[in-house]
Amino acid sequence: MERRELLRLLVSAGALPLLAPLARAAGTDDWQTQFEAAGAPWKTSFATPADDFPLTRATVRGRFPDAVAGTLFRIGPAGHDLGGERYHHWFDGDGMVHRFVIEGADVRHQGRYVATPKRVAEVKAGRRLFEAFGTMPPGVEPPTSADSINVANTSVLPMRGEVLALWEGGSATRIDALTLDTLGVKTWRADLAGMPFSAHPKVDPDGTVWNFGVSSGQGLLALYEIAPEGALRRAAVVPVADMPMVHDFAVTERHLVFLLPPLVYDSKRKAAGASFLDAHVWRPELGMRALVIDKRNWERRQVLALPAGFLFHVGNAWEEDTPRGTQIHIDYVRSDNAGSVFVTSRELMRARRVKTTEPHLTVATLNLSTERATQETLAQEAEFPRIDPRRVGLRHRQVVHATQIRRDLPGFGSIARTDVETGRSQRYSYGAQAMVEEHVFVPDGSKPGWVLGTVLDFGRQKTVLSCFAADNLAAGPVAQATLPYALPLGLHGAFVAT
Protein backbone atom coordinates (compact mmCIF):
# COMPACT_ATOMS: atom_id res chain seq x y z
CA MET A 1 0.00 0.00 0.00
CA GLU A 2 1.31 3.46 -0.87
CA ARG A 3 2.19 5.60 2.13
CA ARG A 4 -0.16 8.36 0.97
CA GLU A 5 -3.06 5.88 0.99
CA LEU A 6 -2.01 4.65 4.44
CA LEU A 7 -2.12 8.21 5.72
CA ARG A 8 -5.59 8.67 4.28
CA LEU A 9 -6.86 5.52 5.96
CA LEU A 10 -5.33 6.47 9.27
CA VAL A 11 -7.06 9.83 9.10
CA SER A 12 -10.42 8.25 8.36
CA ALA A 13 -9.86 5.89 11.30
CA GLY A 14 -9.13 8.79 13.64
CA ALA A 15 -5.52 7.77 14.33
CA LEU A 16 -4.35 11.36 14.50
CA PRO A 17 -1.62 11.02 17.17
CA LEU A 18 0.32 8.93 14.63
CA LEU A 19 -0.02 11.33 11.73
CA ALA A 20 2.80 13.74 12.44
CA PRO A 21 5.69 11.23 12.44
CA LEU A 22 4.22 9.34 9.47
CA ALA A 23 3.75 12.53 7.49
CA ARG A 24 7.38 13.43 8.06
CA ALA A 25 8.44 9.96 6.93
CA ALA A 26 6.35 10.12 3.76
CA GLY A 27 9.20 11.55 1.72
CA THR A 28 12.36 13.60 1.84
CA ASP A 29 12.52 17.14 3.17
CA ASP A 30 13.12 18.44 -0.34
CA TRP A 31 9.59 19.72 -0.61
CA GLN A 32 10.49 22.60 -2.92
CA THR A 33 11.82 20.22 -5.57
CA GLN A 34 8.72 18.05 -5.24
CA PHE A 35 6.46 21.09 -5.58
CA GLU A 36 8.27 22.32 -8.68
CA ALA A 37 8.18 18.87 -10.28
CA ALA A 38 4.48 18.31 -9.57
CA GLY A 39 2.13 18.43 -12.56
CA ALA A 40 -0.93 19.65 -10.69
CA PRO A 41 -2.48 22.47 -12.75
CA TRP A 42 -3.73 24.17 -9.58
CA LYS A 43 -0.37 24.49 -7.83
CA THR A 44 -0.26 28.24 -8.60
CA SER A 45 -2.59 28.48 -5.61
CA PHE A 46 0.33 27.70 -3.33
CA ALA A 47 3.24 29.25 -5.22
CA THR A 48 5.29 32.09 -3.72
CA PRO A 49 5.01 35.51 -5.39
CA ALA A 50 8.47 36.88 -5.99
CA ASP A 51 7.46 40.37 -4.93
CA ASP A 52 4.58 42.66 -4.04
CA PHE A 53 1.80 43.41 -6.53
CA PRO A 54 1.68 47.11 -7.50
CA LEU A 55 -1.69 48.83 -7.89
CA THR A 56 -3.18 47.29 -11.06
CA ARG A 57 -6.48 47.87 -12.86
CA ALA A 58 -8.65 44.79 -13.45
CA THR A 59 -10.76 44.06 -16.52
CA VAL A 60 -14.38 44.52 -15.46
CA ARG A 61 -17.46 42.87 -16.90
CA GLY A 62 -20.71 44.54 -15.85
CA ARG A 63 -20.89 47.10 -13.06
CA PHE A 64 -20.45 46.58 -9.33
CA PRO A 65 -23.48 47.89 -7.38
CA ASP A 66 -23.26 51.14 -5.45
CA ALA A 67 -23.50 49.24 -2.15
CA VAL A 68 -20.16 47.53 -2.83
CA ALA A 69 -18.32 50.75 -3.59
CA GLY A 70 -15.40 50.49 -1.20
CA THR A 71 -12.48 48.19 -0.47
CA LEU A 72 -12.32 44.45 0.00
CA PHE A 73 -9.30 43.55 2.10
CA ARG A 74 -7.99 39.98 1.99
CA ILE A 75 -5.03 38.18 3.49
CA GLY A 76 -3.42 34.76 3.41
CA PRO A 77 -0.16 32.80 3.45
CA ALA A 78 1.98 33.66 0.43
CA GLY A 79 5.68 33.32 1.30
CA HIS A 80 5.87 29.53 1.24
CA ASP A 81 9.53 29.09 0.29
CA LEU A 82 12.80 30.89 0.84
CA GLY A 83 16.37 30.03 -0.12
CA GLY A 84 15.24 26.81 -1.83
CA GLU A 85 13.52 25.56 1.32
CA ARG A 86 9.76 25.12 1.37
CA TYR A 87 7.45 25.14 4.34
CA HIS A 88 5.64 21.88 5.14
CA HIS A 89 2.27 23.45 5.92
CA TRP A 90 0.01 25.93 4.14
CA PHE A 91 -0.57 27.95 7.33
CA ASP A 92 3.16 28.66 7.76
CA GLY A 93 3.60 31.08 4.85
CA ASP A 94 4.41 34.75 5.37
CA GLY A 95 1.27 36.84 5.11
CA MET A 96 0.35 38.94 2.08
CA VAL A 97 -2.42 41.51 2.42
CA HIS A 98 -4.53 42.59 -0.57
CA ARG A 99 -6.94 45.40 -1.28
CA PHE A 100 -9.50 45.48 -4.07
CA VAL A 101 -10.72 49.05 -4.58
CA ILE A 102 -14.20 48.91 -6.15
CA GLU A 103 -15.85 51.86 -7.89
CA GLY A 104 -18.62 50.75 -10.23
CA ALA A 105 -16.93 49.61 -13.44
CA ASP A 106 -13.44 50.31 -12.08
CA VAL A 107 -11.61 47.81 -9.86
CA ARG A 108 -7.97 48.08 -8.81
CA HIS A 109 -5.86 45.56 -6.90
CA GLN A 110 -2.75 45.88 -4.78
CA GLY A 111 -0.95 43.20 -2.75
CA ARG A 112 1.96 43.48 -0.35
CA TYR A 113 3.80 41.16 1.97
CA VAL A 114 3.32 42.07 5.62
CA ALA A 115 6.76 43.25 6.78
CA THR A 116 6.77 41.45 10.12
CA PRO A 117 10.07 41.33 12.03
CA LYS A 118 10.22 37.63 11.17
CA ARG A 119 9.89 38.18 7.43
CA VAL A 120 12.31 41.10 7.38
CA ALA A 121 14.99 39.12 9.23
CA GLU A 122 14.56 35.97 7.12
CA VAL A 123 14.54 37.75 3.77
CA LYS A 124 17.71 39.55 4.80
CA ALA A 125 19.33 36.25 5.80
CA GLY A 126 18.05 34.44 2.69
CA ARG A 127 16.84 31.47 4.76
CA ARG A 128 14.42 30.44 7.49
CA LEU A 129 15.49 31.46 10.97
CA PHE A 130 12.41 30.59 13.02
CA GLU A 131 10.06 27.71 13.60
CA ALA A 132 6.54 27.86 12.19
CA PHE A 133 3.10 26.48 12.94
CA GLY A 134 3.66 23.14 11.20
CA THR A 135 7.35 23.18 10.20
CA MET A 136 10.59 23.01 12.17
CA PRO A 137 13.27 24.12 9.68
CA PRO A 138 16.75 22.77 10.47
CA GLY A 139 18.97 24.89 12.67
CA VAL A 140 16.33 27.31 13.95
CA GLU A 141 16.61 28.88 17.37
CA PRO A 142 13.75 28.81 19.90
CA PRO A 143 11.53 31.90 19.55
CA THR A 144 12.29 34.78 21.89
CA SER A 145 8.60 35.72 21.93
CA ALA A 146 5.39 34.88 20.11
CA ASP A 147 5.85 37.90 17.86
CA SER A 148 9.31 36.76 16.78
CA ILE A 149 7.52 34.05 14.72
CA ASN A 150 4.40 36.07 13.88
CA VAL A 151 3.48 35.69 10.18
CA ALA A 152 0.35 37.92 10.16
CA ASN A 153 -1.35 35.72 7.57
CA THR A 154 -4.83 34.69 8.69
CA SER A 155 -7.44 37.46 8.81
CA VAL A 156 -7.98 41.22 8.89
CA LEU A 157 -9.86 43.65 11.12
CA PRO A 158 -10.47 47.15 9.72
CA MET A 159 -10.30 49.64 12.56
CA ARG A 160 -10.09 53.45 12.60
CA GLY A 161 -8.47 53.92 9.20
CA GLU A 162 -6.10 51.02 9.60
CA VAL A 163 -6.31 47.30 8.97
CA LEU A 164 -5.10 44.88 11.59
CA ALA A 165 -3.44 41.81 10.07
CA LEU A 166 -4.24 38.94 12.42
CA TRP A 167 -2.50 35.72 13.34
CA GLU A 168 -3.23 33.10 16.00
CA GLY A 169 -0.38 33.20 18.45
CA GLY A 170 0.72 36.81 18.87
CA SER A 171 -0.07 40.47 18.34
CA ALA A 172 -2.15 42.01 15.60
CA THR A 173 -0.04 43.90 13.03
CA ARG A 174 -1.07 47.41 11.97
CA ILE A 175 -1.40 48.01 8.21
CA ASP A 176 -2.02 51.35 6.49
CA ALA A 177 -5.38 50.94 4.76
CA LEU A 178 -4.42 53.11 1.76
CA THR A 179 -0.83 52.03 1.08
CA LEU A 180 -0.66 48.61 2.78
CA ASP A 181 2.50 49.77 4.54
CA THR A 182 3.31 47.75 7.67
CA LEU A 183 3.16 50.05 10.70
CA GLY A 184 4.19 47.70 13.52
CA VAL A 185 2.41 45.58 16.10
CA LYS A 186 -0.72 46.68 17.93
CA THR A 187 -0.31 46.80 21.70
CA TRP A 188 -3.65 47.15 23.47
CA ARG A 189 -2.03 47.80 26.85
CA ALA A 190 1.58 47.72 27.99
CA ASP A 191 1.18 44.57 30.07
CA LEU A 192 -0.53 42.82 27.13
CA ALA A 193 2.39 43.26 24.71
CA GLY A 194 2.85 40.09 22.68
CA MET A 195 -0.27 38.41 24.04
CA PRO A 196 -2.16 36.20 21.55
CA PHE A 197 -4.92 38.09 19.73
CA SER A 198 -6.75 35.62 17.54
CA ALA A 199 -7.81 35.83 13.92
CA HIS A 200 -11.60 35.89 14.26
CA PRO A 201 -12.75 38.85 16.36
CA LYS A 202 -16.50 39.45 16.45
CA VAL A 203 -18.06 42.89 16.10
CA ASP A 204 -21.41 43.42 17.81
CA PRO A 205 -24.06 45.51 16.02
CA ASP A 206 -23.15 48.40 18.37
CA GLY A 207 -19.50 48.23 17.23
CA THR A 208 -18.05 46.51 20.31
CA VAL A 209 -15.21 44.15 19.34
CA TRP A 210 -14.75 40.85 21.18
CA ASN A 211 -11.76 38.57 20.74
CA PHE A 212 -9.71 35.88 22.41
CA GLY A 213 -6.26 34.36 22.36
CA VAL A 214 -4.97 30.91 23.27
CA SER A 215 -1.90 30.45 25.45
CA SER A 216 -1.46 26.72 24.92
CA GLY A 217 1.53 26.09 27.16
CA GLN A 218 -0.10 27.83 30.12
CA GLY A 219 -3.62 26.47 29.53
CA LEU A 220 -5.10 29.98 29.45
CA LEU A 221 -7.73 31.64 27.30
CA ALA A 222 -7.26 35.42 26.94
CA LEU A 223 -10.43 37.51 26.52
CA TYR A 224 -10.71 41.02 25.08
CA GLU A 225 -13.49 43.62 24.96
CA ILE A 226 -12.75 46.65 22.77
CA ALA A 227 -14.91 49.75 22.44
CA PRO A 228 -16.17 50.84 18.99
CA GLU A 229 -13.65 53.69 18.95
CA GLY A 230 -10.81 51.19 19.39
CA ALA A 231 -9.96 51.57 23.08
CA LEU A 232 -9.50 48.46 25.20
CA ARG A 233 -12.25 48.13 27.79
CA ARG A 234 -11.27 44.84 29.43
CA ALA A 235 -8.81 42.01 29.12
CA ALA A 236 -8.33 38.96 31.29
CA VAL A 237 -7.34 35.31 31.15
CA VAL A 238 -9.36 32.28 32.21
CA PRO A 239 -8.00 28.75 32.74
CA VAL A 240 -9.02 25.93 30.38
CA ALA A 241 -8.16 22.33 31.18
CA ASP A 242 -6.83 20.21 28.30
CA MET A 243 -6.31 23.30 26.14
CA PRO A 244 -7.28 22.56 22.54
CA MET A 245 -6.54 24.25 19.25
CA VAL A 246 -9.19 27.00 18.96
CA HIS A 247 -9.42 29.09 15.80
CA ASP A 248 -12.82 30.80 16.03
CA PHE A 249 -15.68 31.54 18.42
CA ALA A 250 -19.10 33.20 18.51
CA VAL A 251 -20.93 35.85 20.48
CA THR A 252 -24.58 36.26 21.39
CA GLU A 253 -26.29 39.20 23.07
CA ARG A 254 -25.18 37.96 26.51
CA HIS A 255 -22.49 35.32 26.00
CA LEU A 256 -19.19 34.32 24.41
CA VAL A 257 -19.29 30.80 22.97
CA PHE A 258 -16.26 28.57 22.33
CA LEU A 259 -16.47 25.11 20.75
CA LEU A 260 -13.42 23.22 22.00
CA PRO A 261 -12.43 20.25 19.80
CA PRO A 262 -10.48 17.36 21.33
CA LEU A 263 -7.24 18.32 19.57
CA VAL A 264 -5.27 18.98 22.74
CA TYR A 265 -1.88 20.59 23.31
CA ASP A 266 0.78 18.32 24.84
CA SER A 267 3.72 20.28 26.27
CA LYS A 268 5.88 17.12 26.40
CA ARG A 269 5.64 16.77 22.63
CA LYS A 270 6.66 20.40 22.20
CA ALA A 271 9.61 19.98 24.56
CA ALA A 272 10.71 16.97 22.50
CA GLY A 273 11.06 19.18 19.42
CA ALA A 274 7.69 18.93 17.71
CA SER A 275 6.22 21.84 15.79
CA PHE A 276 3.31 23.65 17.42
CA LEU A 277 0.87 21.65 15.28
CA ASP A 278 2.52 18.32 16.02
CA ALA A 279 2.45 19.07 19.75
CA HIS A 280 -1.33 18.48 19.56
CA VAL A 281 -2.92 15.08 20.16
CA TRP A 282 -6.38 13.90 19.09
CA ARG A 283 -8.30 12.79 22.21
CA PRO A 284 -11.85 11.96 21.10
CA GLU A 285 -12.77 10.72 24.58
CA LEU A 286 -12.97 14.39 25.60
CA GLY A 287 -15.75 15.03 23.11
CA MET A 288 -16.43 18.55 21.86
CA ARG A 289 -16.77 20.90 24.82
CA ALA A 290 -18.91 24.01 24.49
CA LEU A 291 -17.56 26.70 26.80
CA VAL A 292 -20.08 29.50 27.42
CA ILE A 293 -18.92 32.68 29.18
CA ASP A 294 -21.13 35.50 30.42
CA LYS A 295 -20.21 38.72 28.59
CA ARG A 296 -20.61 40.90 31.68
CA ASN A 297 -19.01 38.58 34.19
CA TRP A 298 -16.24 36.42 32.78
CA GLU A 299 -16.18 34.38 36.00
CA ARG A 300 -19.60 32.93 35.11
CA ARG A 301 -18.83 29.98 32.85
CA GLN A 302 -20.56 26.78 31.80
CA VAL A 303 -19.31 23.74 29.89
CA LEU A 304 -21.66 21.56 27.82
CA ALA A 305 -20.85 18.36 25.94
CA LEU A 306 -21.19 17.60 22.22
CA PRO A 307 -19.93 14.59 20.24
CA ALA A 308 -16.23 14.68 19.31
CA GLY A 309 -15.46 16.58 16.14
CA PHE A 310 -13.16 19.22 14.72
CA LEU A 311 -13.80 22.73 13.46
CA PHE A 312 -12.03 25.77 12.17
CA HIS A 313 -14.89 28.20 11.65
CA VAL A 314 -18.13 29.36 13.24
CA GLY A 315 -20.91 31.12 11.34
CA ASN A 316 -22.94 32.83 14.06
CA ALA A 317 -24.74 32.25 17.34
CA TRP A 318 -27.87 33.67 18.94
CA GLU A 319 -29.85 32.99 22.10
CA GLU A 320 -33.46 32.88 23.22
CA ASP A 321 -35.33 32.34 26.46
CA THR A 322 -37.84 29.53 26.05
CA PRO A 323 -40.09 27.49 28.37
CA ARG A 324 -37.35 24.86 28.19
CA GLY A 325 -34.73 27.33 29.37
CA THR A 326 -32.15 29.67 27.84
CA GLN A 327 -30.94 28.21 24.55
CA ILE A 328 -28.00 29.21 22.36
CA HIS A 329 -28.10 28.23 18.68
CA ILE A 330 -24.73 28.12 16.95
CA ASP A 331 -23.83 27.07 13.42
CA TYR A 332 -20.34 25.90 12.57
CA VAL A 333 -18.39 23.81 10.07
CA ARG A 334 -17.76 20.36 11.54
CA SER A 335 -15.45 17.53 10.50
CA ASP A 336 -15.21 14.10 12.11
CA ASN A 337 -11.54 14.65 12.94
CA ALA A 338 -8.60 16.97 12.35
CA GLY A 339 -7.15 15.23 9.30
CA SER A 340 -7.45 18.37 7.21
CA VAL A 341 -4.97 20.29 9.34
CA PHE A 342 -2.51 17.40 9.79
CA VAL A 343 -2.51 15.96 6.28
CA THR A 344 -4.44 17.91 3.64
CA SER A 345 -2.91 21.31 4.43
CA ARG A 346 0.54 19.75 4.53
CA GLU A 347 0.37 17.88 1.25
CA LEU A 348 -0.69 21.05 -0.55
CA MET A 349 2.86 22.26 -0.06
CA ARG A 350 3.96 19.40 -2.34
CA ALA A 351 1.09 20.12 -4.77
CA ARG A 352 -0.61 16.89 -3.73
CA ARG A 353 -4.34 16.51 -3.18
CA VAL A 354 -5.01 14.19 -0.22
CA LYS A 355 -8.67 13.94 0.72
CA THR A 356 -9.60 13.69 4.40
CA THR A 357 -12.94 14.02 6.16
CA GLU A 358 -15.48 16.33 4.55
CA PRO A 359 -16.60 19.38 6.57
CA HIS A 360 -20.34 20.03 6.79
CA LEU A 361 -22.45 22.89 8.04
CA THR A 362 -23.75 21.91 11.48
CA VAL A 363 -26.24 23.58 13.84
CA ALA A 364 -25.95 22.99 17.60
CA THR A 365 -28.36 23.97 20.36
CA LEU A 366 -26.95 24.59 23.84
CA ASN A 367 -29.50 24.65 26.67
CA LEU A 368 -27.89 26.61 29.49
CA SER A 369 -30.68 25.73 31.91
CA THR A 370 -30.49 21.96 31.51
CA GLU A 371 -26.82 21.94 30.44
CA ARG A 372 -27.67 19.62 27.57
CA ALA A 373 -26.51 20.10 23.98
CA THR A 374 -27.72 18.66 20.69
CA GLN A 375 -26.71 19.19 17.07
CA GLU A 376 -27.83 18.52 13.51
CA THR A 377 -25.49 18.17 10.55
CA LEU A 378 -26.85 19.66 7.33
CA ALA A 379 -26.31 18.16 3.89
CA GLN A 380 -24.06 20.96 2.63
CA GLU A 381 -20.31 20.55 2.46
CA ALA A 382 -19.01 23.86 3.70
CA GLU A 383 -16.17 26.11 4.74
CA PHE A 384 -15.59 29.84 5.29
CA PRO A 385 -19.09 30.64 6.67
CA ARG A 386 -20.08 34.32 6.67
CA ILE A 387 -23.30 36.13 7.61
CA ASP A 388 -24.80 39.60 7.29
CA PRO A 389 -22.50 41.55 9.66
CA ARG A 390 -25.53 43.38 11.08
CA ARG A 391 -26.76 40.05 12.52
CA VAL A 392 -23.67 39.12 14.55
CA GLY A 393 -24.93 37.65 17.83
CA LEU A 394 -28.56 37.98 16.72
CA ARG A 395 -31.02 35.54 15.18
CA HIS A 396 -30.13 34.85 11.57
CA ARG A 397 -31.04 32.29 8.95
CA GLN A 398 -28.75 32.78 5.95
CA VAL A 399 -25.10 31.69 5.88
CA VAL A 400 -22.85 32.28 2.86
CA HIS A 401 -20.16 29.62 2.47
CA ALA A 402 -17.91 27.77 0.07
CA THR A 403 -19.16 24.35 -1.02
CA GLN A 404 -18.70 21.54 -3.61
CA ILE A 405 -15.70 19.42 -2.72
CA ARG A 406 -14.16 17.72 -5.75
CA ARG A 407 -12.06 14.61 -6.03
CA ASP A 408 -9.36 16.11 -8.23
CA LEU A 409 -8.89 19.52 -6.62
CA PRO A 410 -8.23 20.91 -3.15
CA GLY A 411 -10.80 23.21 -1.64
CA PHE A 412 -14.17 24.07 -3.14
CA GLY A 413 -15.70 24.86 -6.51
CA SER A 414 -18.93 26.69 -5.63
CA ILE A 415 -20.34 29.43 -3.44
CA ALA A 416 -23.62 28.80 -1.59
CA ARG A 417 -26.18 30.52 0.61
CA THR A 418 -27.89 28.16 3.06
CA ASP A 419 -30.88 28.64 5.36
CA VAL A 420 -29.70 27.06 8.62
CA GLU A 421 -33.28 26.60 9.86
CA THR A 422 -34.67 24.76 6.84
CA GLY A 423 -31.47 23.43 5.27
CA ARG A 424 -32.49 24.79 1.87
CA SER A 425 -29.56 26.07 -0.16
CA GLN A 426 -28.76 27.73 -3.46
CA ARG A 427 -25.36 27.75 -5.10
CA TYR A 428 -23.30 28.94 -8.03
CA SER A 429 -20.57 26.74 -9.49
CA TYR A 430 -17.51 28.48 -10.88
CA GLY A 431 -16.58 25.58 -13.15
CA ALA A 432 -14.03 22.81 -13.36
CA GLN A 433 -10.92 25.03 -13.26
CA ALA A 434 -11.76 27.29 -10.35
CA MET A 435 -10.87 27.25 -6.65
CA VAL A 436 -13.18 29.28 -4.43
CA GLU A 437 -11.98 31.60 -1.69
CA GLU A 438 -14.04 33.06 1.15
CA HIS A 439 -16.95 35.29 0.04
CA VAL A 440 -18.40 38.01 2.28
CA PHE A 441 -21.90 39.44 2.65
CA VAL A 442 -22.28 43.17 1.89
CA PRO A 443 -25.46 44.83 3.22
CA ASP A 444 -27.56 47.16 1.06
CA GLY A 445 -30.04 48.88 3.37
CA SER A 446 -33.32 46.96 3.45
CA LYS A 447 -32.52 45.18 0.17
CA PRO A 448 -31.30 41.55 0.06
CA GLY A 449 -27.67 42.63 -0.17
CA TRP A 450 -24.70 41.30 -2.11
CA VAL A 451 -22.13 38.51 -1.95
CA LEU A 452 -18.57 39.49 -2.84
CA GLY A 453 -15.55 37.23 -3.19
CA THR A 454 -12.59 35.93 -5.13
CA VAL A 455 -11.79 32.75 -7.01
CA LEU A 456 -8.65 31.43 -8.65
CA ASP A 457 -9.21 30.47 -12.29
CA PHE A 458 -6.13 28.28 -12.67
CA GLY A 459 -7.03 27.43 -16.25
CA ARG A 460 -6.43 31.05 -17.24
CA GLN A 461 -3.98 31.71 -14.38
CA LYS A 462 -6.01 34.68 -13.20
CA THR A 463 -7.79 35.72 -10.00
CA VAL A 464 -11.38 36.90 -10.42
CA LEU A 465 -13.47 39.06 -8.09
CA SER A 466 -17.23 38.42 -8.39
CA CYS A 467 -20.36 40.08 -7.04
CA PHE A 468 -23.72 38.27 -6.73
CA ALA A 469 -27.22 39.29 -5.69
CA ALA A 470 -27.45 37.58 -2.30
CA ASP A 471 -30.97 36.30 -2.91
CA ASN A 472 -30.12 34.86 -6.35
CA LEU A 473 -26.69 33.27 -6.33
CA ALA A 474 -27.72 30.71 -8.91
CA ALA A 475 -28.18 33.48 -11.52
CA GLY A 476 -24.44 34.06 -11.50
CA PRO A 477 -22.36 37.20 -10.98
CA VAL A 478 -23.82 40.62 -11.74
CA ALA A 479 -20.25 41.87 -12.16
CA GLN A 480 -16.74 40.42 -12.34
CA ALA A 481 -13.26 41.92 -12.25
CA THR A 482 -10.43 39.80 -13.68
CA LEU A 483 -6.84 40.46 -12.70
CA PRO A 484 -4.07 39.92 -15.26
CA TYR A 485 -2.37 37.48 -12.87
CA ALA A 486 -3.12 34.77 -10.30
CA LEU A 487 -2.86 35.36 -6.57
CA PRO A 488 -2.00 32.61 -4.08
CA LEU A 489 -5.05 31.29 -2.27
CA GLY A 490 -5.81 33.30 0.84
CA LEU A 491 -7.87 32.79 3.97
CA HIS A 492 -10.09 35.64 5.19
CA GLY A 493 -11.16 39.16 4.36
CA ALA A 494 -13.35 42.12 5.24
CA PHE A 495 -15.23 44.76 3.24
CA VAL A 496 -15.17 48.47 4.06
CA ALA A 497 -17.69 50.71 2.32
CA THR A 498 -16.52 54.01 0.87
Image (spheres, grey):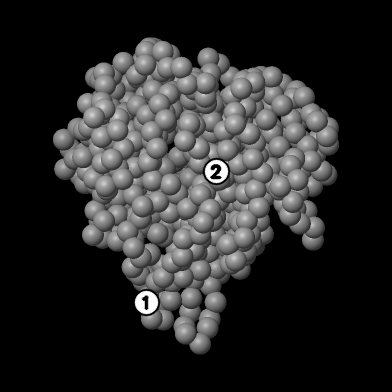
Question: Whole-percent x and y of residue 495?
Answer: 67, 43
On-image quarter of the N terminus: top left
Residue that lies at the very extreme toward the bottom in this rendered image: 323
Question: Would residue 359 appear left or right of 269 to someone viewing this image?
Answer: right
Which residue position holds label 1? Answer: 371
Which residue position holds label 2? Answer: 404
Question: Would residue 138 appear left or right of 205 to someone viewing this image?
Answer: left
Q: Quadrant of residue 240?
A: bottom left
Q: Considering depth in this image, is 337 or 260 the residue closer to the camera?
A: 337
At horizontal 63% and vertical 34% (from top left) the residue drawn is 431
Secondary-structure class at tag 1: loop
Q: Considering depth in this image, is 352 or 294 the residue closer to the camera?
A: 352
Question: Whole-percent x and y of residue 58?
Answer: 74, 25
User: Can residue 193 be seen here?
Assistant: no
At horizontal 71% and vertical 47% (from top left) the residue drawn is 474
* Closer to the eye: label 2 or 1: 2
Question: Whole-percent x and y of residue 319?
Answer: 53, 72
On-image quarter of the C terminus: top right
Q: Considering depth in this image, is 229 or 272 the residue closer to the camera?
A: 272
Q: Give the mark, 2 or 1, whose residue is nearer the N terminus.
A: 1
Q: Amino acid at mark 2?
A: Gln
For mark 1, does the 10 Å Cα neighbourhood hold few (<14), some (14 to 19), or many (20 or more) residues? some
At horizontal 47% and vertical 21% (from top left) the residue drawn is 40
Question: Would residue 393 appear left or right of 117 to someone viewing this image?
Answer: right
Secondary-structure class at tag 2: strand
